[in-house]
Amino acid sequence: MNTPNFHVIKVYYIGATNSKPSRVKLVSERFKVSKTIEYDHQFNGICDIALDWLSKNGFNIIGKAEGKDCYYIISDTFNSIIANS
């Protein structure tokens, strides 16, 4: 069986603190690195924010899934998320 390999990016919400606004954290399961981006209220939630950021930074998105308190975005782009900051 020929099963393709993909890049999985975990996405979750980080609530506001006294000194920082709400944020969205993207974690590359492949490279074990993370990128935190601002929560953008023009979108309909953290998954849409992450999809927009990833698309604008050259990632080809092929799917998404829901996890417990997170989302998983599946890409066939194997770039590191921190290389695209």
Image (cartoon, rainbow, N blue to C red):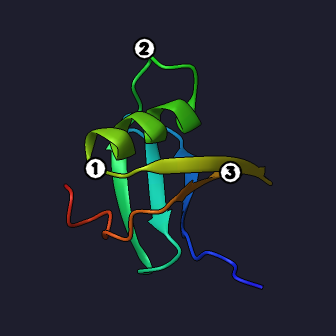
In depth, the one of 76 and 51 nearer the eye is: 76
Give me the C-alpha separation between circle 2 and circle 3: 20 Å
In terms of sequence position, does the residue under pointer 1 or pointer 3 come before the other? 1
Q: Visible in this render: residue 81?
A: yes
Q: Which residue is mark 1?
A: 58
In terms of sequence position, does the residue under pointer 2 or pointer 3 come before the other? 2
Q: Secondary structure at mark 2?
A: loop
The residue lying at 65 percent from left, 47 percent from top is: 64
Circle on res. 42: 2
- In the image, residue 71 sits, relative to residue 42, either above or below, namely below
Circle on res. 50: none
What's the residue type where badge 3 is placed? Cys
Mark 1 residue crowding within 10 angstroms, few (<14) / some (14–19) / many (20+)? few
Give me the C-alpha separation between circle 1 and circle 2: 21 Å
- Rendering coords of residue 34 (x, y %): 39, 66
Q: Secondary structure at mark 3?
A: strand
* Residue found at the very far front of the displayed protein: 1
What's the residue type where badge 1 is placed? Gly
**Position of residue 32 in the picture relative to residue 44 (left or right):** left
* Residue found at the very far bottom of the displayed protein: 1
Q: Are marks 1 and 3 in contact (CB under 8 Å)?
A: no
Q: Which residue is mark 3?
A: 70
In terms of sequence position, does the residue under pointer 1 or pointer 2 come before the other? 2
What's the residue type where badge 2 is placed? Gln
